Image (cartoon, grey):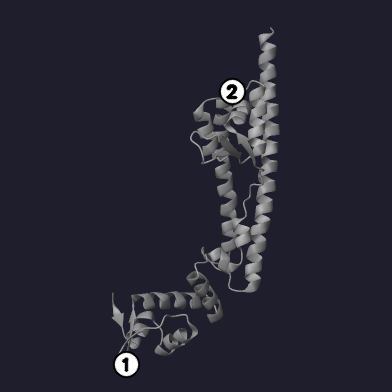
Amino acid sequence: MTEYRIDDLARAAGTTTRNVRGYQDRGLLPRPVRRGRIAIYTDDHLARLKVINDLLRRGFTIRHIDDFLSGMARGEDLADILGIREIVSEPWSTATSTSMSAAQLRELLNTGNPAHLDQLIQFGLISPDAESDPPEQYTIRDQETVSAYGRLVKLGVPLAGILDVHRRLDREMSAVAATVISAGRRAVAEGHTDGWIPQTTAETDWARELLTELRKAGTVSAHNALDRALDRDMARQLREYMGEARRSLG
């Protein structure tokens, strides 16, 4: 690792020895190692100085940089530092959960095929208790969906077919989610660079409100768009079905 005296460090970082000492006094820069009366700095100090310089060029104040670096040092992530943890970490899904024995689950879905349960686990619809192998108890993580599938099975729809549809729907929804979240990302970075960080309380409040409204708009828009698409395709396929029925009757 390269070692620097303070003059060399300041020159390599594109700053002044006065700034280096000032950052040390504020706790933004770790103290150097002392060898007698000589202060020795390392590449770690240089890297930290480059970060500080970059944030200053972006318009951050020393106070903001102090908050940012202190939060990172405590192990906090960017969402915590910006005060938007509750927005970005709150699950979008509001599905209810319940517990069910393995026997009850098999009866509900009319299956004894372990592959079917493995698929449900993979989809995140259920999770097995870890206390037994094979599991004797499951947590139903999406009670509404699993119950709906149970009702379809009871009406004679094969579970294998239901799971195949679920897989394809999940893949399509992943594409929809990427579209919505990417739009939000572009909106946050609009007028800035990607990776922009709010610098004031007002900007943080704006980012928090934007993410909140994005959550609401994305959920409502996707739900209603799916309902409209289902209505359209139901009408289309019903016309096709009735046409086939009329032709078969002569």
Residue 167 appears in which quarter of the rendering? top right
Depth check, front residue: 76 or 139: 139
Category of crowding for the residue at label 2, using alpha-carbon neighbours closer than 10 angstroms: few (below 14), some (14–19), many (at least 20):
some
What residue occupies the far bottom of the structure in this picture?
Answer: 37
Res. 242 in view: yes
Residue of label 1: 37
Image height of 20 relative to 225, above or below: below
Disc 1 marks a residue whose amino acid type is: Arg
Contact between labelled residues 1 and 2, with CB atoms less than 8 Å apart: no
Which mark, residue 158? 2
**Residue 225 placement, left or right of 181:** right
- Residue 162 percent location from the top left of the image: 59, 28
For numbered disc 2, what is the local secondary structure?
Answer: loop
Depth check, front residue: 235 or 91: 91
Q: Nearer the viewer, mark 2 or mark 1?
A: 1
Res. 59 in view: no
- Which numbered disc, 2 or 1, marks the residue that appears first in the sequence? 1
Depth check, front residue: 148 or 99: 99
Depth check, front residue: 71 or 217: 71
Which mark, residue 5? none
**Residue 242 placement, left or right of 182:** right
- Residue 44 percent location from the top left of the image: 37, 75
Q: Quadrant of the C terminus?
A: top right
Disc 2 marks a residue whose amino acid type is: Pro
Q: Name which residue lies at 57% across and 34% down.
A: 166
Q: Name which residue lies at 50% across and 70% down.
A: 74
Image height of 60 relative to 230, above or below: below
- Residue 224 percent location from the top left of the image: 70, 42
Residue 241 appears in which quarter of the rendering? top right
Q: Quadrant of the N terminus?
A: bottom left
Disc 2 from disc 1: Cα separation: 81 Å
